[in-house]
Image (spheres, helix red, strand yellow):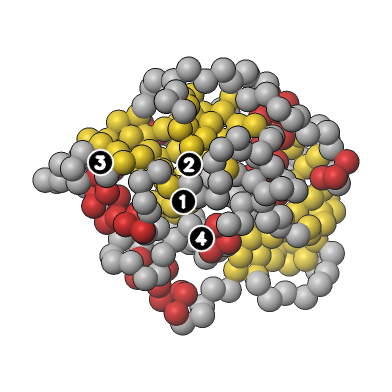
Amino acid sequence: MSDKSPVPVGPVIALPGHAVITLLGRDAVAFAQAQFMNDVDALADGEWHWSGWLTPKGRVIALFALLRKDPQTLWLVLLDGDAEAIVQRLRGYIFRSKVTIEIDEGVTVGGRFAAAARARGYAIAEDGVNVELDLGTGEQPRSLLIGGHLDAARDDCAAAHWRVADLQDGLPRLTDSEREQWTPQQLSLERLQAFSVKKGCYPGQEIVARTHFLGKAKRGLALLTGGSPIAVGSDVMSEGKPLGRVMSAASAAGEHVALAVLPLERAQAALLVDGADVVEAPLRDGLAR
């Protein structure tokens, strides 16, 4: 189904819902290391990785790309959610840390269905105006651009294709109803190397580490395709019984996809969502590094 849909290539498209949060100050890296689920200390200046912020019970509040621009400056490229509300919650944990947390209103986030010009893997590229991230592979090229003078056109169709591509790559897009519902393992975030089980403490770390080391991850993401839009929050039914739940969905040009949290071990059987047939498809490796 995905192979038949036209995909826009080339121009930079504006990405609705994306925002950039800046952590600035002497303690920016230490603050992020203590709060977020990936190992910020492992990043060199000019590198990025996927990361997120968890509740104490290990549920994902937000998922983002974290860029280490220099020893005192981090960018969180937030994909979804109320950026101002997240900033306010983060500020509640500053205490005596020398760090400021602000939404960078002066930058725009855009995407392009083309290989990054200079960025490779987890190394960002800067040209003095824009920052570039490599989000794809040779077979599935995508790049992300962030800048104050970014020429990103609003194109609802192309933005819808971008969201579909995110889900096909196993990148969850969190609606408000799905926030604080899922652990990193339930969202298969190990595929994105988005969390650490070896670094020091952070909110939810005990749950994440216990699940990892005791092998208790029972559920993970499955990519579903259907002939009509798939609703977030719907049960995935199999043999008349609920098997799991749709946590993210997207549609573009007649292509309808969803990410559902399903048991990792399950019998092969027909799947239904809201009475309509859906088919499981393999997650792509576009974000593998």
Q: Residue at x 48, y 17 (%)?
A: 149
- When asked about the image quadrant of residue 220, the answer is bottom right
In this figure, which residue is indicated by the disc labeled 4? 193
**Amino acid type, label 2:** Ile
How far apart in space, not on screen, are marks 2 and 1 (Cα)? Answer: 10 Å
Disc 2, disc 1: CB below 8 Å? no
- When asked about the image quadrant of residue 284, the answer is bottom right
In this figure, which residue is indicated by the disc labeled 1? 49
- When asked about the image quadrant of residue 83, the answer is top left
Q: Which residue is drawn at 55% across and 50% down?
A: 121
Q: Which badge, 4 or 2, comes first in the chain's sequence?
A: 2
Secondary-structure class at tag 2? loop
Q: Does the rendering let one see residue 231?
A: no
Residue 86 horizontal/vertical position (percent): 36, 39
**Amino acid type, label 1:** His
255 to the left or right of 82 = right
* Label 3 vs label 4, nearer the camera: 3
In this figure, which residue is indicated by the disc labeled 3? 72
Question: Up-down: is 245 above or below 2?
Answer: below
In this figure, which residue is indicated by the disc labeled 2? 124
Foreground of the two, 56 or 1: 1
Q: Which residue is drawn at 83% across and 69% down?
A: 269
Q: Which badge, 3 or 2, comes first in the chain's sequence?
A: 3
Q: Residue at x 28, y 65 (%)?
A: 201
